[in-house]
Amino acid sequence: MTSTIEELLRYDSPIQHTGRLAPEEMMLGGQLIRKRQAVIAVIGAANRDPLRFTDPDTLDIARQDNRHLAFGWAAHYCFGAPLARVEAQIVFSTVLRKLRNLALEPAPLVWRNNVTFRGLEVLRVTFEPAAMGRN
Ligand code: HEM
């Protein structure tokens, strides 16, 4: 469960980019960035960087070397990351426990039309309720 949640965060990062104003002039990735110039850091691209991740476009729920940037980095690292991780654990483990024969409906996935927040508009699935008495 733990590695699955980290891999989902890496593979389809819910926040695709963030922005900064450069505090001073600097060279970054061969580009001159001027003081106060706006820079967009594309988290979604960093999390698929082939120099960082083996086979980055493969969803590998057992991936171990997975220090992704889905919650940002350094001073502004996501304040809610531990809560988001716990919520994901509760949701996925409950869904797996409560819903038998969970399967995707054979329909195209529809993604939100938003350049910053990545996610599905809707995820259609079929399932049967778990047997009575199980919690
Ligand atoms: C999957 C869920 C979440 C994702 C992917 C996410 C992602 C991020 C990212 C990438 C940043 C850094 C933005 C930047 O550096 O410009 C951030 C910052 C932040 N997040 Fe989250 N977040 C999530 C859930 C939450 C939750 C549940 C809370 C609060 C309960 C929260 C509160 C914050 C706050 C307060 C900051 C700003 C921290 C600062 O600037 O010092 N986040 N988040």
Image (cartoon, rainbow, N blue to C red):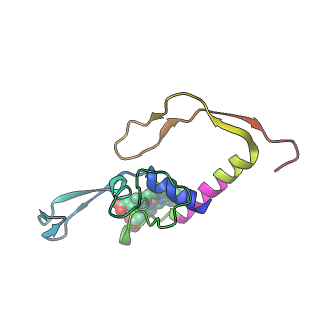
- Is 31 situated left or right of 1 in this image? left
Please state the quadrant of the image where ligand 1 appears. bottom left
Queried whether the magenta region covers residue 68, the answer comes back as: no
Q: How far across and how far down the image is residue 42, in percent? A: 31, 54
Which residue reaches farthest top?
Answer: 107
- Is 77 situated left or right of 51 in this image? right
Main secondary structure along the magenta-highlighted residues:
helix
Queried whether the magenta region covers residue 83, the answer comes back as: yes
Q: Quadrant for the N terminus, please.
A: bottom right
Whether residue 87 is situated above or below residue 35 in the rendered picture? above
Q: How far across and how far down the image is residue 52, in percent? A: 36, 64
Whether residue 109 is situated above or below residue 65 in the rendered picture? above
Q: How far across and how far down the image is residue 94, in percent? A: 71, 50
Which residue reaches farthest right?
Answer: 133
Q: Nearer the viewer, residue 18 or 61?
A: 61
Residue at 19% across / 57% down in the picture? 38
- Is 21 situated left or right of 112 in this image? left
Count the labels in the image.
Answer: 0
Residue at 87% across / 42% down in the picture? 132
Residue at 55% across / 65% down in the picture? 82
Q: Nearer the viewer, residue 3 or 77?
A: 3
Q: How far across and how far down the image is residue 2, in percent? A: 59, 62
Residue at 14% across / 69% down in the picture? 27
Whether residue 4 is situated above or below residue 95 in the rendered picture? below
Q: Nearer the viewer, residue 74 or 79?
A: 74
Residue range in magenta is 82-91
